[in-house]
Amino acid sequence: MRKLLVFIIALMVLATFSGIGFAQQKAQEGGSAGEKKDKASPKLMTGKVLEINAKAQTFTVTAKGKEVTFSAAKLKALPKVGEIIDITYTENPNGPAEATNLNSSRSNIY
């Protein structure tokens, strides 16, 4: 009877550790959607326009205490300094983030 009890406990321990190893392997393969970051997918930010560089087609926004510069190459018009806007943008590893859409924000929080 004692050998049977030891055998059952050993099987339970083995099953537990093999399950953990399987879960770790899935996580390393990129199983979680939260871990993957697609830089081409559009993001949204609300901020206040600090400065505009019409020559370079860029503008700088402050949001959550940070200053971010955006390229306005795909926009029809540049925003105005002091305006609070909602910006839809995509990240660009070679330069400033690229703004794809601007809307006047209804929020006073940026």
Image (cartoon, helix red, strand yellow):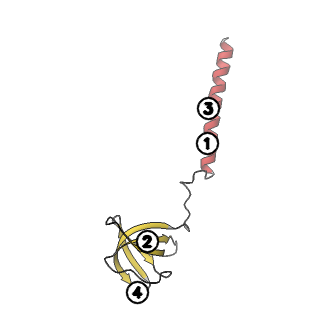
Looking at the rendered structure, which numbered label has been put on residue 54?
A: 4
* Residue 52 sits in quarter: bottom left
**Front-most of residues 21 and 86:** 86
Looking at the rendered structure, which numbered label has been put on residue 43?
A: none
Q: Amino acid at mark 3?
A: Thr
| Nearer to us: label 2 or label 4 | 2
Q: Amino acid at mark 2?
A: Ile
In the picture as drawn, the residue positioned furthest to the top comes out as: 1
Q: Tell me the residue that label 2 is attached to.
A: 87
Q: Tell me the residue that label 3 is attached to.
A: 16
Identify the residue at horizontal 56%, vertical 57% (top origin). Answer: 36
Disc 2 from disc 4: Cα separation: 18 Å
Label 4 or label 1, whichever comes before in sequence order: 1
Looking at the rendered structure, which numbered label has been put on residue 23?
A: 1
Determine crowd level at label 2: few under 14, some 14-19, many 20+ residues with C-alpha closer than 10 A: many
Instruction: Determine whether 96 is above or below 109 in the image.
Output: below
| Nearer to us: label 4 or label 1 | 4
Disc 1 from disc 3: Cα separation: 11 Å
Label 3 or label 2, whichever comes before in sequence order: 3
The C terminus, quarter of image? bottom left
Task: Determine if residue 102 is in view.
Answer: yes
